Amino acid sequence: MLSQKEIEALIFLLDDPDEAIYRSVSERLAEQGTTVLPLLEKAWEKNLDPLLQERVEQLTHQIQFNDVRRALSRWAAEDGEDLLEAALLLDRYAYPERDQTALREKVAELRRAVWLELSQYLTPLEKVHVVNQVLFRHLGFAGLDDLARDPRASYLGTLLETRKGNPLSLGLLYLILAQQLELPIYGVRFPQHPLLAVTEGYLPHFERVDLREQVLFYLYPFRHGAVVTARDIEDNLQKAGVKARPEFYLPVTNRSMFQEMLLILENLYRGKDLEAKAAEVAGLRAVLLENALPAAG
């Protein structure tokens, strides 16, 4: 590790007009990780040179992105099933200044609000109705059509702050609450619109040939948790001119679902011509592919 004086000397060289020197300095600073961020922030505040400020901002973002990518790699390698941890990492990528502790507390409050209304004697359908009642009617969470293709609405923190989201953020929150409340609800790889499957019980193995038969019904978090059947899904696919595929009906692990959500987010950024953001999300998704696990959950 470099000393503080060495780091400050390198930061001083960030505005060097020689591109080769700038790249070399930037790479050395990036290797130091998040420890250099306070010094970069200090340099940005004290030096009003536009070039240096721009390069400090770029380097800061790169260091923060690398940190999130390493953390996501650890998440995938260790377990890859705690969706709240994955959602917070993704939020940290887009909004590094957000208070992660505050987000955890908000999720805990939501969990408590739903838990107080649940009973072990309720049927799976009744439990889903309770979640929907608390989340959408009492607390005012909603999916807005004008946010459906807005990548900014895909992040958990944005949803928790505004209570308005798109299919990605609402699907993610619903799955997080289901996991924390021990409800057997899983994601389904449905095209561009996260669909959830409610099963008879927990699924220890996701390669079972009868996996679809374990599904009791499906639901759309984006539509206030609307309950649908496999036939409803098939009809909607036909209306949209999309050919039904087996994976559109099969529950998957939380890890697989998060990977699918990253792909959708990547495409949302591409739809807005934000190629740099799309490439970064693709880089996060690649981390999960690099840490692939067997299909069994």
Image: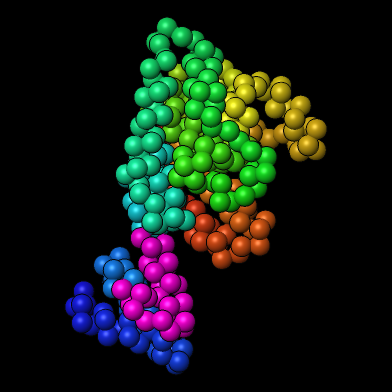
Task: Give the position of the C terminus as an image quadrant.
Answer: top left
Please name the residue shown 72% across and 34% down the image.
244
- Residue 59 locus on image (x, y percent): 41, 73
| Residue 158 appears anywhere in the view | yes
- Residue 118 in which image quadrant: top left
For the magenta stretch, what is the residue range? 42-67
x and y percentages locating residue 9 in the rendered image: 27, 85
**Residue 242 located left or right of residue 89:** right
Exactly how many numbered labels are in the figure? 0
Q: Residue at x 30, y 84 (%)?
A: 10
Q: Position of residue 51 (x, y in %)?
A: 46, 83
Q: In the image, is residue 51 part of the stretch drawn in magenta?
A: yes
- Please state which of residues 101 and 47 is positioned toward the viewer in this rendering: 47
User: Quick one: which residue is furthest to the top in this view?
Assistant: 121
Residue 88 lies within the magenta run = no
Q: Position of residue 128 (x, y in %)?
A: 52, 19
Q: Is residue 33 visible?
A: no
As drawn, 83 above or below 113: below
